[in-house]
Amino acid sequence: MAEDQARAEKILQALRENFVLPKWIPSRRDPFETLVITIISQNTADKNTARAFERLSKNFPINPEALANAKTSKIEECLKVAGLYRNKAKAIKQVSKILLENFGGSLTPILSMPFEKARETLMQLPGVGPKTSDVVLLFSANKPTIPVDTHVKRVSKRLRLAPIDGEYEAVRESLQRLYAPEVYADVHVLFILLGRKYCRARNPLCRQCPVNAFCPSRKS
Ligand code: SF4
């Protein structure tokens, strides 16, 4: 374990030296905005997520009351540039209604719960799975969790920082054992950047990869 932690630390250090943490980390965003953006972002490229969110923001105030009372067709219209826009529009409207009816129109009562209870309650909302919950909890409530998207999962497994056959929870727990909570957000973001630039799903660029010295999966 101590050996794994030392290697994990070296990997993080190398990533910090090679990538600039982007300013788009949604740490200062309103939690409801983060939730809406993360629902829109499911299986959608960043550029289209941003376009869809911008269109939605131009048409509605981004709060549960406005979106609970919006016509679904109008929300769909705004989200058309994102994939699965009908499902996402439905989920956003339903989540808004639930927050309005059961939580006083705000995510604050949920985010004030103890971590596990908050996570469980978020995951009961329509269209909200573990990744979306963890993004909201980490970036808008400063709770100790690491969201595992497709890049984080692939990179963690190739680096052997997570079990090779592990699903979402196993990867999350493994990373959380290796890193301190203060760096969870950096780990999430830097692993995504590594996955996009070097550790691609197909043809990873191992020779140029900044963490190849610490990677058991590197190809020569
Ligand atoms: S060395 Fe290759 S497999 Fe390992 S993290 Fe880098 S790109 Fe991925």
Image: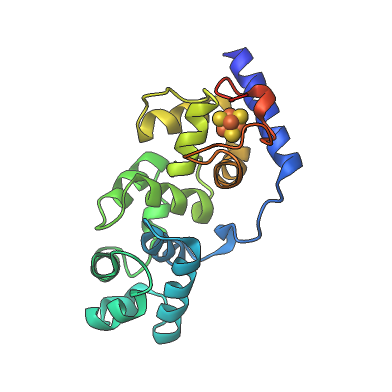
Residue farthest to the bottom, as pictured: 59
Q: Is residue 18 left or right of residue 198?
A: right
Q: Is residue 110 left or right of residue 194?
A: left
Q: Is residue 209 left or right of residue 148?
A: right
> Is residue 50 in view from this perspective?
yes
Residue 55 is drawn in which quadrant? Answer: bottom left
Using the image, determine if residue 102 lies above or below residue 64.
above
Residue farthest to the right, as pictured: 17
Nearer-the-camera pick, 147 or 42 = 42
Q: Quadrant of ligand 1?
A: top right
> Is residue 145 in view from this perspective?
no
Task: Give the number of callouts.
Answer: 0
Quick one: quadrant of the C terminus?
Answer: top right
Nearer-the-camera pick, 53 or 66 = 53
Quick one: quadrant of the N terminus?
Answer: top right
- The spot of residue 128 in percent (x, y) is 31, 54
Using the image, determine if residue 37 lies above or below residue 68.
above
Residue at x 32% of width, y 52% of height: 122
Residue at x 70% of width, y 46% of height: 19
Nearer-the-camera pick, 117 or 132 = 132
- The spot of residue 69 in percent (x, y) is 26, 81
Residue at x 44% of width, y 67% of height: 49
Residue at x 39% of width, y 52% of height: 132
- The spot of residue 6 in percent (x, y) is 67, 20
Residue 187 is drawn in which quadrant? Answer: top right
- The spot of residue 92 in percent (x, y) is 30, 68
Looking at the image, what colour scheme do you see? rainbow
